[in-house]
Amino acid sequence: MKEAVDLVMQAKQVDVYISAGNLYFAQNLQFQLQEIGYVIQVPQEDYLQRLYAANSTSDHVALVISYGDRGHTTRAVVDLLVKNQTPIILITSTQSNPLTTFADIKLYMSSVENHYNKLSSFSTRFSLLMVLDLLYAEIFSREYDSNLEYKVANYQKMNGELK
C-alpha cells in the first residue's frame, strides 16, 4: 500500500480503469481525491478507457481494478499502458489473473467468491471499497494539514465564504 500511495502522490494524473460493476467505487475515489486537488479520471465506456490509456504517459498512474481479467477491454487497456510506460497499480483477487505480470504494484481484495455461483459480490465489494478507502486515507494523512486546509478553503470558496 505504501508504494501505491507513493506512485499516486507523484503522478500528474490518476486514471482508474474499471468494469461496470466497480464504477461507483471508482467514482467515490475520484470525488475524494478531487477534493484535495488531484487530477483523476474514471473513463466509463470501453472506447474512452482505450483512449485514456493511449493518451497516458509515464507521468500518469493507472489504477486497474480487475478481479480476474474477465472484462473484454481491460487487457487492451493494460497493453496500451505498458506501451506508454504508465505505472500500473492492479487491484485484483489472489486468484490467477494474467494482468499481474504487467502490474508494478498489486493490491489484493477478497478472493473467496465464485463468479458464477453466488447471490452477489458482497465480499468483493466490501474489500474493494476498503482497499480504495485505505488508499485515500493514507494519501490524505501523508499531508494531512495541507490537504485539510485545501479542502476547507475550496468549500469556503464554493459557498461564497472566502474571497
Image (spheres, rainbow, N blue to C red):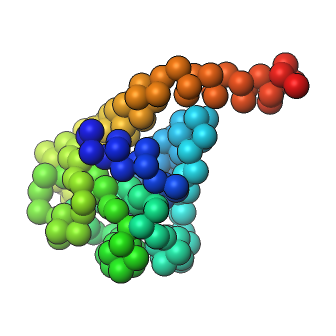
* Relative to 94, 16 lies left or right: right
Q: Is residue 36 left or right of residue 127?
A: right
Residue in front for this viewpoint, 100 or 24: 100
Q: Position of residue 5 (x, y in %)?
A: 35, 42
Judge from the rendering whether residue 111 lies leftward or rightward of residue 134; answer left or right: left
Which image quarter is the N terminus in? top left
Residue at 32% across, 75% down: 82
Which of the 4 image quadrants contains residue 136? top left
Q: Position of residue 124 (x, y in %)?
A: 27, 44
Q: Nearer the viewer, residue 146 or 106?
A: 146
Q: Is residue 43 left or right of residue 99?
A: right
Residue 40 image point, x, y percent: 54, 52
Residue at image location 13% in from the left, 52% down from the top? 94
Front residue of this view, candidates 33 and 43: 33
Q: Can you give x and y, in whole percent of width and height, for residue 92 in the image?
A: 24, 54
Q: Quadrant of the C terminus?
A: top right
Total numbered circles: 0
| For residue 83, above or below residue 24 | below
Residue 12 seen in render: yes
Q: Nearer the viewer, residue 13 or 116?
A: 13
Q: Please say whether residue 113 is visible from this viewpoint.
A: no
